[in-house]
Image: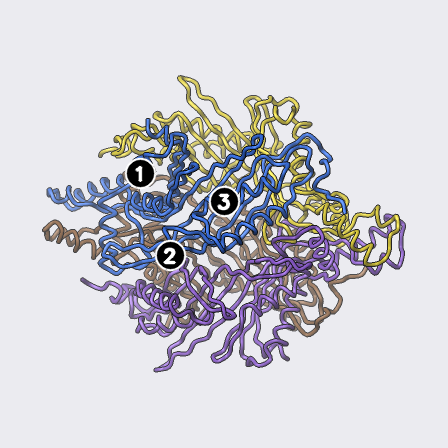
Chain colours: A yellow, B purple, C brown, D blue
C-alpha cells in the first residue's frame, strides 16, 4: 500500500512552518504542589515539514501523545509544561523529517481560596503550557512556557475622582472626609493572563503565577460571598483602583521580585482585558518582553 | 435520476419536528423608521417532516430564501420579522409535505445615541426575528416575533448599603450627607434581551424595544465618553442601582404601558444577564409569559 | 444591616420565571458503571421569584451547591442528573419563597473505544444533566434528564447516486460491479445530542445513550487511525450513508427498543447537525417528543 | 479636574507594548472593485505606552476612529487596510507620547459566485485588515496587511487509495477502470486564511486573494446546489484530492505567480484547517514567511 505522505508534493519547493492537529481533548495527570491532579486540556500539536515531503504523518502525533499521556497516568509528571516538553521531543523522534515540534495545552484548573472574611472557596483558572523543540545536528533543544489566566475585578481610578467632584458640587459638601474616603467608580470583570518561559533546570510554579495575577487586580473575585464579604471586597477594590495598565505593571514588578534567579533571556508576556461596564467594548493592556528588558 | 429524499425512510413511523439548515449568512435590506438599512443576519430555516418522507429537500430552503431576499433587495420589506414571515410561508409553498415552517434571524444593528452630555454615538445592538407558519387544511397561519439584545450597566443596590455602613464605621463619620448620597457598589456589564410577539395587523418597532431595554439598566453605555460624560454616567448608574431582577421587572412594566393595544395572548420574554464584577460567574433573571398574564 | 433582597420590589406585581446564576464551574465526582470519575461541569442554577420579593438570595445558590458538591466528593452520587436533583431540592429548601428550582450541568466526558481494527482509543463526549423541582403544598416533585452529545461522521446517500451516474457516463462504463459497490459522496463531521427524562426509580445510563448515538452515524470517529483503520472507517461509512434525518430516526428506533420499561410520558429530544462539507452552512434534523408518541 | 492618565504610574519603569480597546463594532464603507460596500467590522485599536505615562487616553482611540469612519461614510476609502492605516496614523497624531499604533479589523464579506453548473450564488467570506504605524523622529512609517478567510472542501488523497484497494479486494474486481476513476475518500469542511502585506504604493485586491484561496481547495462550496450541481462538485473534489498541506502549498505557488511585482520583504501567512470528518479534532497546516523566501 503506497505511503502517500512520503511522496514529493506535486508543487515542490515549499516547506511548511507547522503541520499538525488542533482541538484534541485529553485527560492527563500531573503533580502540582505534591498533589496529583486531573486536568482536561485542549491540545494543539505540530511539526514543521520540509519541501521534499508531501504530508506529515498525522497519526504519529496521536501515537506519541497517547503513549506519553498514558505513561503520565501511571507516573504523573511534575507539570503541564513538562508534559508538553516530553510530547514535543517525542514528535521529533517519530517525525524524522522534521526539525521543529510544538505542543500547546490549555486546561481548566481549580484552587482553594479564602474570601475577605475567610470563607473557603474553590476558584477556577486556566493553565496554559507550551513547548517548542528544535533539532540541530544531533541535539534537541526545548524551550517551554507555563502560563495562567485568572478573572478578577478592576475599579477605575479616573472616574472615581470625577464622581467625587460631581457629588461634592451637587450636594454642596466639601468636608475633609469626602477627600479621604474611596469613592464611587465603574468597576468590571477583568481577565488577565501571565505566561513565562521556564528554562531548563528551573521550576516555575503555576500556583505562584496565579497568586501574582490575582493580587494585582483591584480585588480578586469569589464564587460565594455573604453580604459582609461582598461589602468588604467592593470597598477594598475601590481603595485599590487600577487601570488595565496598572494591572500589567504590578504583575511585571512582582515577576522581577519573585524570579530573581531566572536568566535575562526568559520571555514574559502579560495581557489584561477589562469587560468595561461603561462601554460595550473592552479595554486592554499588554507587555511582551524578556526578564532582561524588565530589569533594566 | 432517483430522488432519494422522496423515498420512504428505511425506519418508518417517525416524523421529525424540524429539518433544515442553520448558520446561513445573508445580506438583506429592510426599511426601519423610514430609512433603508442593510443587515447581515445569521439565519436558521426549517420545516417539519412527515413519517412518510425520507428527507427534506434542503436546497428548496435556499431557493425560497434567495428569491425572497433578492426581492427584498429591490423592494425592502418593513421589518426583519416580516422577512422571516415571507420566507416561512414560501417554505410551506415549496415543501408540500410539511405543515410547519420556522425561520429565525439574528443580526448586528446600529442606532444613533446621545451620551449623558449630548455627544453623538453610534451604538450596536442585536436584532432577533422569528416566524413560525402552520398549515391547517387550506389556511396558513403565521406567528411572528421581534426581539432585541442590548448591553448596559447594572450597579448593585445591596452592596451599596453594606459599603456605606463599612465606610461610616471605618472612618467614624455619620453625617446626614453620608446617608443621602449614592455610594460605592459593584457594577458590571449586563446583556438583556426582550422578545415580543407581533400579531397580524399590528406593528412593533424594534427601536422602541431597544429604548425600553436601554432605559431599564442602571445606565446605558456608550462607545465614546469624555471624562465628564463618564463621571455623570457612573454617578447616574449609582443613583439608580438595580438587580437583574429589577431590570426585567422594569422592562415588563414598560411593555404593559407601551403596548396597551396588543392582545392578551401575545407572548413576551425578557432575559437579563450580568457579568458580575465580584464573581467569575454571571447572575441572571428571566420572565417568559403573555401580555394577559402581565396585565393581571 | 438591611436585607435588600427581602424588600418588596419598587415595581410590584411581577413574579419572575427564573432568577439565578450561569457559567459556574465546578469539579464534581460521580460513580459511573462502578468507577468513580471526576467531571468539570459548567452549571446553571435558578429558582422562581414571587412578586412580593425584590431579589433572590444569590449566595444561597452557591451555599447549597457547594455543600452538595463537597458531600459528593466524599460520597459520590450515582449520576450527574442525581447531583442536579439533590441541588435543585436543596435550592427549594433554602429559598423558602420559591416553588420552582432548576439545575443544569454540561461536562466533558471520556470513554474507552475501539477503532475498526481494534486499537484502543479514549474518545471525548459531552454529558448534559438537568433537574427541575416543583413545590406543591408540602410535596416536592422533581423531574430529571440525562443527555449526551457525540461527534461522528455522516455520508450523504443522495450525492452518492448522482456521482455514480456521473462516473458511469463520463467513463462509458456500466458494469454490474459499478452498481453494487458504495460510491463517492460528500461526508462530514456531525454533532448529535440525545436527551431523555429519567423518571423516579428508573435508571438511564449515559454510556448507553452514547452507544445509541454513536452507532447511528454513518460511522463513529476516532482520535487515532492508522492507514488501514482509516480506510475501513471511510468505506464502512459509505456502505451506511445517512441524512441527518436518518441519524435522528435511527436513534428514536433504538430508544424505543432499549427503554421498553420507561413510562409513556418520558420526554425525549434528539438533535443532529452536520457541518456540511459542500456548504458553508449546516444541515440539521430534530425531534422533540415523548416515548408514548414514539410508540404509537 | 486632574488628568489621572497623565500622572506617572506608581510603579515606574515599565513601558507597555499595547494599550487600547478590543471588540469595537462599527459600520464602515469602502470601495471595492468600483462598488461601494458596507462592512461591519470588529475592531481592535492600540498604541504603546512609555514608562512615564500612567494610562493611555482611551477615549482618544474612539475619537480618532469615529472621525475617520465618519469621513469614510462620505468619501469611502479604497480598501479596509487603507482605513486601518488612516486610523493608525490618526492614533499617533492624538497620542503624542506613543510611537507605535496598531489597528485590526475583521468583517463578514459577500461575493457573487457561480456554482459548477452556473447558478448564481452569494457566498460569504471574512476580510482581515491590519495596519501598524511607527514613529521615528519626524517620520511615520506604516506597514499594512490585507487578508481573507474562506470556507471550502478538502477530500483526502491518502484514504482514497486505501479504500480503492479495500474495495478491489472485497469485491474481487481489478479492472483498469477501477484504477483510473476517482474513489471514495473522507472529505470535510476546511477553513483557510491568507494574509499578505501591502507595501506603500502597491495594491492587493481582496477579491483576488479569495479567488486564490477558493481555487486551492479540493472544491469551493456553495450555498445553493441542485442535485446535478452537488454531484459535479463532489466528483470534482475527488478528482482533486488534497491534504491541508497541499492547500497551503497551492496558495503559495499562486501568490508567487500573481504578485511578481511585490518586493521580497512582503510578509505572507497561510493557514488551512480541516474539520476532519473522521476525527473529532482538526488537522492544520501553516506557512509564515516572506515573498523573498518563497521565491528562493
Query: Along the line of sight, which residue is nearer the eye, A14 or A115?
Result: A14
User: In the rendered structure, the residue with mark 2 lies on which chain?
Assistant: C
Residue indicated by mark 3: D84
Q: Position of residue B60 (x, y in %)?
A: 31, 66
Q: How busy is the neighbourhood of tag 3: few (under 14 within 10 Å), some, or many (20 plus)?
A: many
* Residue drawn at the location 22% of the way across and 64% of the way down: B3
Residue indicated by mark 2: C282
Q: Position of residue D50 (x, y in %)?
A: 64, 33
Viewer-nearest of labels 2 and 1?
A: 1
Q: Is residue B135 above or below residue A131?
A: below
SS class of the residue under badge 3? Answer: helix
* Residue drawn at the location 45% of the way across and 26% of the way down: A133
Q: Quadrant of residue C288?
A: bottom left
Q: How many marks?
A: 3
Q: How busy is the neighbourhood of tag 1: few (under 14 within 10 Å), some, or many (20 plus)?
A: few
Q: Which residue, as the protein is rendered here, is positioned at the far top?
A: A138
Q: Is residue D131 in view?
A: yes
Query: Along the line of sight, which residue is nearer the eye, C190 or C110?
Result: C190
Residue indicated by mark 1: D258
Amino acid at each position: 500500500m503506497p505511503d502517500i505522505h512520503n511522496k514529493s508534493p506535486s508543487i515542490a519547493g515549499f516547506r511548511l512552518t507547522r503541520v499538525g492537529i488542533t482541538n484534541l481533548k485529553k485527560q492527563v495527570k500531573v503533580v502540582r504542589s505534591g498533589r496529583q491532579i486531573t486536568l482536561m486540556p485542549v491540545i494543539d500539536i505540530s511539526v514543521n515539514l520540509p519541501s521534499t515531503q508531501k504530508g506529515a504523518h498525522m497519526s504519529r502525533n496521536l501515537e506519541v501523545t497517547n503513549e506519553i499521556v498514558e505513561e503520565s497516568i501511571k507516573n504523573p509528571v511534575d507539570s503541564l509544561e513538562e508534559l508538553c516538553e516530553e510530547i514535543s521531543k517525542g514528535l521529533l523522534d517519530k517525525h524524522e523529517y522534521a526539525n521543529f515540534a510544538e505542543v500547546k495545552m490549555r486546561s481548566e484548573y481549580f484552587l482553594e481560596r479564602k474570601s475577605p472574611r475567610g470563607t473557603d472557596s474553590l476558584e477556577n483558572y486556566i493553565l496554559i503550557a507550551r513547548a517548542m523543540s528544535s533539532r540541530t545536528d544531533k541535539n534537541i533543544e526545548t524551550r517551554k512556557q507555563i502560563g495562567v489566566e485568572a478573572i478578577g475585578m478592576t475599579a477605575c481610578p479616573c472616574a472615581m475622582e470625577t464622581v467625587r467632584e460631581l457629588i461634592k458640587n451637587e450636594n454642596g459638601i466639601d468636608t475633609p472626609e469626602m477627600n479621604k474616603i474611596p469613592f464611587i467608580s465603574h468597576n468590571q470583570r477583568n481577565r488577565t493572563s501571565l505566561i513565562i518561559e521556564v528554562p531548563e533546570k528551573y521550576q516555575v510554579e503555576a500556583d505562584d503565577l496565579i497568586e501574582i495575577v490575582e493580587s494585582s487586580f483591584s480585588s480578586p473575585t469569589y464564587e460565594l460571598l455573604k453580604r459582609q464579604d461582598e461589602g468588604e471586597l467592593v470597598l477594598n477594590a475601590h481603595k485599590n483602583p487600577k487601570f488595565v495598565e496598572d494591572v500589567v505593571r504590578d504583575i511585571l514588578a512582582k515577576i522581577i521580585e519573585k524570579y530573581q534567579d531566572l536568566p535575562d533571556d526568559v520571555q514574559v508576556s502579560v495581557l489584561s482585558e477589562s469587560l468595561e461596564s461603561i462601554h460595550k467594548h473592552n479595554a486592554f493592556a499588554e507587555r511582551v518582553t524578556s526578564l532582561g528588558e524588565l530589569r533594566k
